[in-house]
Amino acid sequence: MNQKHKFETNAIRNQLKRSENLEHSVPLYLTSSFVFEDAEDMRASFAEEKERNIYSRYSNPNSSEFISKVCQMEGAEEGFAFASGMAAVFSTLAALLDSGDHVISARSIFGSTHSLFQNFFPKWNISHSYFDTNDLDTLEPLITPKTKLIYAETPTNPGVDILDMEVLGQMAKKHNLILVIDNCFASPYLQQPIKFGADLVIHSGTKLMDGQGRVLAGITVGTRELMDKVYRFSRITGPALSPFNAWVLSKSLETLAVRVDRHCENALKLAYYLEGHAKVNWVKYPFLKSHPKHHIAKKQMKAGGCVVAFEVKGGLTAGKTFFDSIQLLSLSANLGDSRSIVTHPASTTHSKLSVKERQESGITEGMVRISVGLEHIDDIIADISQALG
Ligand SMILES: *Cc1c(COP(=O)(O)O)cnc(C)c1O
């Protein structure tokens, strides 16, 4: 690792040592286990007296390279790579929380994470409270002697609300709580939550990191102390990322900066276009001046990200007509892909929530989420324009 180089250079040049074949691009280590020199080597390796690969459920050169890149990007000490973003969320929280613990989370979080808090953690006597995503003053009164952790995403999915990470960091520090930020919507290129006081950062590598809709992946990075707990739990329970997917992701990270720059440029242009459209009720994008937390987005993000949310005039029926009229863009559930994707959160990703819960999370029935891709912006706008027409 080289701290004197810039983000883009490190993303490309931080790679595994070359093998005796002197390959230029990193090879794929598709192996489940590794061999030992002799009995003493094996004993010392299992006793963790040596840092080396033993078995790919614990570590593998490809996942280590991926982890090392993300740690460098996020300014983190250690990390662990998972088979999906949700495996990262679940394993991280399960490793850190004990029966009786209490979590305080922003109300607007990824649907499956919400379901984890709501439907599964209570089985292990882990409770939660939600604070208002748009009013951080509602957080502190929820803290009890049992509270151990604060959980949040920014920008949020799908409403692209922005939370002030500096305030969250100060709150966590003041009450000695662990701050976990899901940084998936921004990617480490746009913001680094550790700078603002996060202890752990989680990503779904499936989104902007892969960026081409090919692999599922997740990663958690943060302090050595907390990541050691996450590692101990994960090497036993087995949510590890496959070497192949890690290899794909390490290559993807080499182009993260250029891809995300273009995603953001296209998204901002689309947001401006929608803002001036007669058939649109409202548009939300962090780098639009009309976004209620625009000044905070500017403080903590390099650009606004790939997701634009808006509402078609005419509610659910008009929303449906809009979806059925889309020709070029994909109707799909992913985001951060090179292909632009249109989603209707109320009937898909957040359909398991009640109407009231959706309202509290800022998801209206006619709301549309667009993950703006890398196609030419003129073609993206043309498709949306004809569908609105
Ligand atoms: C997609 C997503 C996840 C879950 O990631 P998977 O790779 O689909 O398991 C978690 N958090 C956010 C914000 C996401 O968008």
Image (cartoon, rainbow, N blue to C red):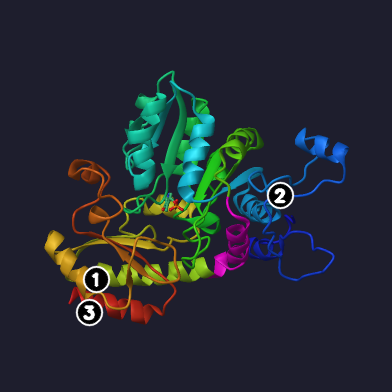
> Distance from label 3 to label 1 (Cα)?
15 Å
Instruction: Please tell me the numbered disc located at residue 145.
Output: none
Percent position of residue 175, x then y: 49, 25
Q: Are marks 3 and 2 in contact (CB under 8 Å)?
A: no
- Quadrant (top left, top right, bottom left, bottom right) of the N terminus: bottom right
**Three-letter code for the amino acid on which mark 1 is drawn:** Gly
To which quarter of the image does residue 100 belong? top left
Residue 140 sits inside the magenta stretch: no
Q: Nearer the viewer, residue 260 or 244?
A: 244
Which residue is denoted by mark 3 in the rendering? 386
Q: Nearer the viewer, mark 3 or mark 1?
A: 3
- Ligand 1 has an atom within 8 Å of the beta carbon of the residue at disc 2: no
Which residue is denoted by mark 2 in the rendering? 33
Percent position of residue 274, x then y: 27, 69
Sooner in the amino-acid sequence: mark 3 or mark 2: 2
Q: Is residue 42 left or right of residue 161?
A: right
Q: Nearer the viewer, residue 133 or 358?
A: 358
Instruction: Please tell me the numbered disc located at residue 276.
Output: 1
Say above or below: 145 vs 257. above
Percent position of residue 218, x then y: 52, 51
To which quarter of the image does residue 331 belong? bottom left
Please, what secondary structure does the residue beneath circle 2 have? loop
Sooner in the amino-acid sequence: mark 1 or mark 2: 2
**Three-letter code for the amino acid on which mark 3 is drawn:** Gln
